[in-house]
Image: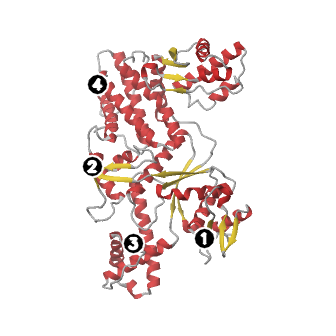
Amino acid sequence: SYWARHFYKDRLRRGYMQIKSKLEQLVASAIESAFEESGFNIIDLPDCCLERPKDETNGDWASTVAMRCAKALHANPRIVAQTIIDHLPANDVIASCEIAGPGFINFRITDKALQGVVKDVLLSGKDYGKGEKITSPCAVNIEYVSANPTGPMHVGHGRWATLGDAIARIMRHAGYNVTEEFYINDHGVQLDTFGKSISLRYMELLGVGFEQPESFYGGAYVIDLAKEILDEDGTKWAKVSEEERVAAFKEIGYKRMLSSMKNTLSSFGTTFDVWFSERSLYTADKTGTTAIDRALAYMDKKGCLYKKDNALWFKSTDYDDDKDRVLIKENGEFTYFMSDIAYHYDKLQRGFDHLIDIWGADHHGYVKRCEAMLEAWGYPGSLEVVLGQLVNLYRDGEVVRMSKRTGEMITFDEVLEEVGVDATRFMMLTRSSDQQIDFDIELAKKQDATNPVYYVQYAHARICSVIRKAFGTEVVQGVALPNDLSMLTHESELALMRKLDEFIECVQIAARDRAPHRVARYAQDLAALYHQFYTNCHVICEDEALQAARLALCDATRIVLALSLNLLGVSTPERM
């Protein structure tokens, strides 16, 4: 039918369909058959509205579709529910269904359908849960971290790196075309201040004291940079003018800080497709125009600029901002917002349909004006800002504010050095981006079940150990799909298979909501169910058919655990 085709056109995933989708298809078919037979006509048939009951004794899935239909038909919802049940086509998915309360339909899934999930996973391998190419939006740009190259990365930057990288991985698995971008803030006053700070420290090392300016980078890393320059170049920079020295040190410091950031991110497993320099916005192309010029010309064409008090303004209040914004000051200087306008306009001109920016929560007041600029250009809703909350560092429950090494802010490199990449990534992703994270360094280092990443990785390593033992090899090999999976009927086995089936939906929702914490939570739940299965069901046993089936379930779990961890950028050790 037209309705069924429309409802399920995006449900197929590389030759397999999640149990939920199969159930939705059956219910849709039953509704249509019932309505055709009764002569009822509802133009907009409701969604099947499947949810997992809070109480597992009520079944695997529950639907409110009967109550929604009954409202449109002015009928008794329990009668409508029974009519839907009576028209369900023959299938091997539904074991039983019953009507509860005012008209809920509760479904229980057959063991056979759950056993089919093991087959799907083994046949699909690393492509399990992978979505078909999404055509709208066609191209997504995710810009994150984008730290000023005037100092080392702090722990907050680490959270944005983790979040952006995981969102990109998950969205790609769900079928999105994603480009990851780092916006280098290499233009403006902050770099001038950085160069002057290095210059003052350099001269201090040569015995020239100074009074610290109000705007000054006072971190120990600035002294280290000055020492490096002195070691490499000697006193030659003391013989030039201050202006020349500051200009040179600005470039030297900028390049070394950027290189340091790239090294940190690379060691963390975060890579970017594009490193975009803010300076390039002010560089003329072959036509003699800059990105700034082109953005201003387009905004002028759209009629959203005006002059007042010798400054150039953007009519952002026309697009629900609380006040208009200055783009060019009275003295002719560009505002920071002008750079942002040109940068976002450039991204659109490069062919991106949807822009995702990941910012710290302290930038929340900046969101509306940035949304306004894209709406002014005719791209409403094409900018999405994900705000990340702060990271609170603890050590055994005690707040940690300063580095023991330097007595200053703890850098992201220091956390990675002590905790490691895997634990840092996983701990950073255990909460939604809009929640603060309490990161306990000592907990992240523990190698027991209290440490969530260790708990999940141990489940993966345990499965690898079982497979090696079963085949008498030192290398983990894929398990062949057995002819018979029907013996997988123990409740621990069924619970594990239900969870494997949930992975497809988990990825889709995590991609849609930009919510990697859902995958982290899923991985923990899957690991817990495997540990229960391992305790309750002996894999290596005398019954060869049962052993083959349980090994297949183990390997399917290994594949999905590895997929989950890979989507978070976490490794999958085979031995622990």
Give the Cα distance between marks 3 and 2.
Answer: 31 Å
* Residue indicated by mark 1: 283
Q: Residue at x 46, y 83 (%)?
A: 244
Asked if labels 1 and 2 touch by Cβ distance under 8 angstroms, the answer is no
First of labels 1, 3 by sequence position: 3
- Judged from the image, the secondary structure of the residue bearing numbered disc 3 is loop
Picture layout, residue 8 above or below residue 575: above
Give the Cα distance between marks 4 and 3.
Answer: 57 Å
* Residue indicated by mark 4: 535
> On the rendered image, what quadrant is the N terminus found in?
top right
* Residue indicated by mark 3: 217
First of labels 1, 4 by sequence position: 1
- Judged from the image, the secondary structure of the residue bearing numbered disc 4 is helix
Q: Residue at x 38, y 22 (%)?
A: 493
Give the Cα distance between marks 1 and 4.
Answer: 65 Å
Give the Cα distance between marks 2 and 1.
Answer: 50 Å
First of labels 4, 2 by sequence position: 2
How many numbered marks have been drawn onto this rendered protein structure? 4
Residue 508 lies, in percent from the top left, at 53, 37
Give the Cα distance between marks 1 and 3.
Answer: 28 Å
* Residue indicated by mark 2: 397
Mark 1 closeness class: few <14, some 14–19, many ≥20 residues within 10 Å? few
